[in-house]
Image: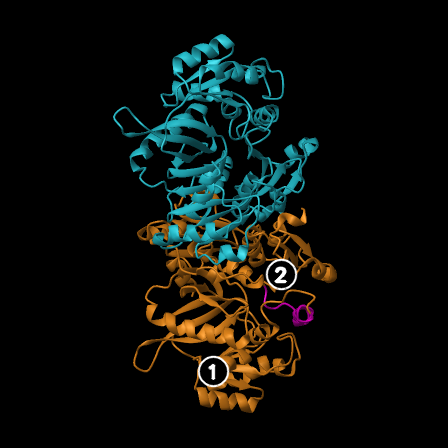
Chain colours: A cyan, B orange
Amino acid sequence: MTSNAYPTTQTIHTIGILGGGQLGMMLAQAALPLGYRCVFLEDNADCPASLYGTVYSSEQLDDFISTADVFTLEFENTPTDTVQKLSALSKQGQKKGMFPPPIALEVAQDRLKEKQMFNDLDIATVPFESVSSKAKLDAACQKLGLPIVLKTSRGGYDGKGQYVIKETSDIAPAWQALKDAVSGKGSLTPTPAPLIAEGFINFSREVSMIAARAQDGQIRCYDLVENHHHQGILAKTHAPAVGTSQLFGQAQTAITTIMNHLDYVGVMALELFVSKDARGHDRLLANEIAPRVHNSGHWSIEGAVTSQFENHIRAVVDLPLGDTDNVHPSIMVNVLGEYPSISDVLSIDGAHYHSYHKSERADRKIAHITLMPNDVTDLEKALGKLVAVLPNKVGLDKKQSESKK
Amino acid sequence: MTSNAYPTTQTIHTIGILGGGQLGMMLAQAALPLGYRCVFLEDNADCPASLYGTVYSSEQLDDFISTADVFTLEFENTPTDTVQKLSALSKQGQKKGMFPPPIALEVAQDRLKEKQMFNDLDIATVPFESVSSKAKLDAACQKLGLPIVLKTSRGGYDGKGQYVIKETSDIAPAWQALKDAVSGKGSLTPTPAPLIAEGFINFSREVSMIAARAQDGQIRCYDLVENHHHQGILAKTHAPAVGTSQLFGQAQTAITTIMNHLDYVGVMALELFVSKDARGHDRLLANEIAPRVHNSGHWSIEGAVTSQFENHIRAVVDLPLGDTDNVHPSIMVNVLGEYPSISDVLSIDGAHYHSYHKSERADRKIAHITLMPNDVTDLEKALGKLVAVLPNKVGLDKKQSESKK
């Protein structure tokens, strides 16, 4: 394509994305209509993003770097040294930037640093303690009161690297199971790091807020949304979360404070618990950040004036952010493991299907469906129809998910 | 990608599209999230659609055919023999279909057949006469009354192959200019065909209706929209057209009748004039059909629950059609010839930018922008801001377009 297929003022033509999964794919779906090309650093040549641009393997890192003008990521466990390198090239003026900044990854990859940052910024969390010895674990159990959850602070997903301590007799086996993480032995974590002991808090629901921050510091926040998980995997998101108007300001202040603190650029997700304060009022406790576009923001493709993917791209290429208001209320449902009949799904008015072109595998995220009928009174009815035609209803069908507990 | 990246019931994996321009590109943008791949038959390897799938040149027709399971088109001047061949292969059961059917192209490529079909189906048009000799032209001028427009019935675009006969002395030079089309000599038309003489009708505005017809005969119609042209090129579309509720039913009946008559599958556009009947009431006169997705339906990407592109794909792969209701009112503006500053465009809330990745050339369609602010009272204000930042305002800026007349 000739070079004048761009406005003459445009200096960024190609966006390099670390990772080529469905998040990278949806970033490209947003970037191409804005006039940009995307390339991906990803070892799976058949990844979802491969439909939208060239995929470079990690061995082709130099080619990837030379092709792209600016860099971002879709996967926060990207090797930090690659991110550091791209950030350094940008600081030297050779590239137009690496967004989000490396510091955001460092914080997001470490539960202890993350929660410490929240508290340093006066953002409430569950009570927690750093645990680097058996004696400190004993002290933490004393201070927090049982039950607690003991976790590795780095690595460990989907329940791995976690131990619930319900009574005093659980303390020794929990320490035995996780102590190698402290010294960096074994396969639990990438680097030695203290454990984190978290107190139990009763919460009524999980919500998240997505926000975008531009290079000039402008921030735009999406609605608070309500997330339903099944065994740690997001099953569905209601956008907006019903009855959270009183909480919106608190979440907005929290994510704004975090983004400004990190000098963040791009889209970030903040996961929060809705709990009760001493007077019985709803309050938010910050759980974790994701320094990237997030599954709980997929509804925004149809459900918001500007999607999280487009706003992330806009931030990365230094364009003004778009309106984050919702267009109509919507519900996003993940398709896990097995494809439905697309004909059954699309017979529901207002159903938007997003295949990731991935092969079926138990509980794998292979597609998502956003329901946004024009008339909001049809929304719950549409959800009922959708659940009826999904082969895997985990986290969606009340009867089934209860019977599995 | 492994074959189980599809639902097991899915027999169509790849859609072959004749043409690879921006319409093909936007069809692919709709098809990929539904889980399909697209390939294109197009001699320009750098075409807009090349970002979304493999492009085969006309010399690679056999490869194109063997790769795709079902076929459609984005360009109605596709060679009829290719369409016939793909249709025949489908009838033999070797392929899953060629949509729309060849008959729809034959009609759309011939102004005389098209208007005759309209009248045969009791759909009003401007008065017209077939002209195959000087004597018939004289008779047509007598019957229709001057002024008339004399046109080739096949070929001829953007004012070529047309002659306005204002007074009797224009008749002889008009016949001289266009008579070769009747015998098939010269370069005016692809094949010999009579001319068409059309009477002049005062009309207040041009509107169009887009509709989709599924393989089971289900039809869903979009809102009537109002189109503004500059020298035959669409400049902008208002969706829906204000004050057309009384006309919707007439347009819906017309396009439904036409689609059923042609046993049409896919999206069709019907262009209409709003004129006055004898009692001074608004009435519609059919001008022409486009047997494909249409520029006056681009607003539907954001502005309708299901876009024209997605509904065309759904029809082609035999899925149920989606809701055609508008989400909020919107305005689509074509970017002609020169790219604007994308930063200026995106600083308008509710602006959606669609680059075609084409190089700049005078009056060429290189992008479009759909304005859909969440609050409809911001819509005209957004249009004002957009016109202010577009380098080429033809058909948009009242002062400029009037001074050019």
Q: Chain of mark 1?
A: B
Decide: few, some or many residues near mark 1? Use Cα within 10 Å; few <14, some 14-19, many ≥20: some
* Viewer-nearest residue: A112 or B24: A112
Q: Secondary structure at mark 2?
A: loop
A148 displayed left or right of B85: left
**CA gap, disc 2 and disc 1:** 31 Å
Q: Amino acid at mark 2?
A: Gly
Magenta-colored span: B75-92
Q: Is residue A311 visible?
A: no
Question: Where is mark 1, residue-wise?
Answer: B119
Q: Is residue B110 left or right of residue B341?
A: right
Residue occupied by mark 2: B19
The quadrant the C terminus of chain B occupies is: bottom left
Q: From the viewer's perspective, is residue B403 above or below residue A359? A: below
Q: Secondary structure at mark 1?
A: helix
Give how far across and how far down residue A367 sits, in percent.
54, 46
Residue closest to the eye, B55 or B135: B55
Q: Residues within 10 Å of mark 2 (few under 14, many from 20)?
A: many
Pick out the residue farthest to the left. A279
Mark 2 or 1, nearer chain start: 2
Q: Give the amino acid type for the residue marked by disc 1 in the picture.
A: Asn
Residue under the point 30% across and 78% down: B280
Depth check: A166 or A118 in front? A166
Rendered view: A206 above or below A337:
above
